[in-house]
Image (cartoon, rainbow, N blue to C red):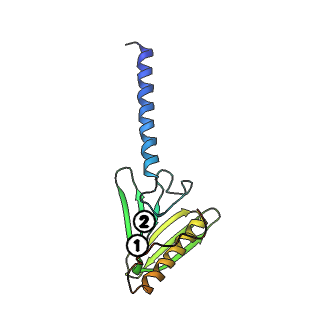
Amino acid sequence: MTSEQTWIWVGLTAGAIFAVIVAIVWQKGRPFAPGDVFRASRLSSGNHLFPTQVLVTQSSVVQYKPRWIGRQEETIHMAHVASVKIDTTLMFSNVLIETSGGSDPIRCHGHRKRDAEEMKRLIEQYQNDYYLGGGRPPSGPVAPPPSGR
């Protein structure tokens, strides 16, 4: 094998490795579940490769943090959400979802202002539905949000 052929193989191998890394980063950045999933911006600190995602369902709030190997998830049942705080900065909004049970709150940063407000709106709507329904999630379909994302 000549020197030129060796460099071709090195280039092809490096290109293949780069393509695999890009595919992994792209795959882990996709929404992890169907429904109302809010992803942090890749431009915000700590979210460049694997943006944090928040899923809001009728019964719980799930924070999903993908990693190179595996993931970290934290779930708070809707009955245990004590408050939702939004801190809006120049470019992004930070969301703090506190619990009534004394466990660590869900902290996520780098969301668009509109997404942060929609998260809060959905949590409040689902909490109202939960408590008006006698402590259980509503049985029918949930009305879509008033504005499209």
Task: Give the labeled residue for mark 2.
Answer: 63
Q: Is residue 138 above or below residue 5?
A: below
Q: Callout 2: 10 Å neighbours few (<14), some, many (20+)?
A: many
Foreground pick, 99 / 79: 79
Real-space Cα distance between discs 1 and 2? 10 Å
Looking at numbered disc 1 in the image, what kind of residue is underneath it? Ser
Residue 25 image offset from top left, x and y in percent: 45, 47
Image quarter in which the C terminus is found:
bottom right
Q: Residue furthest front?
A: 140
Foreground pick, 40 / 143: 143
SS at badge 1? strand
Q: Residue furthest top?
A: 2
SS at badge 2? strand
Image quarter in which the N terminus is found:
top left
Relative placement, left or right, of 77 versus 45 is left
Task: Give the labeled residue for mark 1.
Answer: 60
The dot on residue 114 is none
Q: Residue at x 36, y 57 (%)?
A: 71
Q: Is residue 57 above or below residue 82?
A: above
Relative placement, left or right, of 87 versus 103 is right
Residue 22 image offset from top left, x and y in percent: 46, 42
Residue 63 image offset from top left, x and y in percent: 42, 65
Q: Residue at x 54, y 68 (%)?
A: 94
Q: Residue at x 47, y 69 (%)?
A: 107
Foreground pick, 62 / 2: 62
Q: Residue furthest left?
A: 70
Q: Callout 1: 10 Å neighbours few (<14), some, many (20+)?
A: some
Looking at numbered disc 2 in the image, what kind of residue is underneath it? Gln
Q: Residue at x 46, y 65 (%)?
A: 54
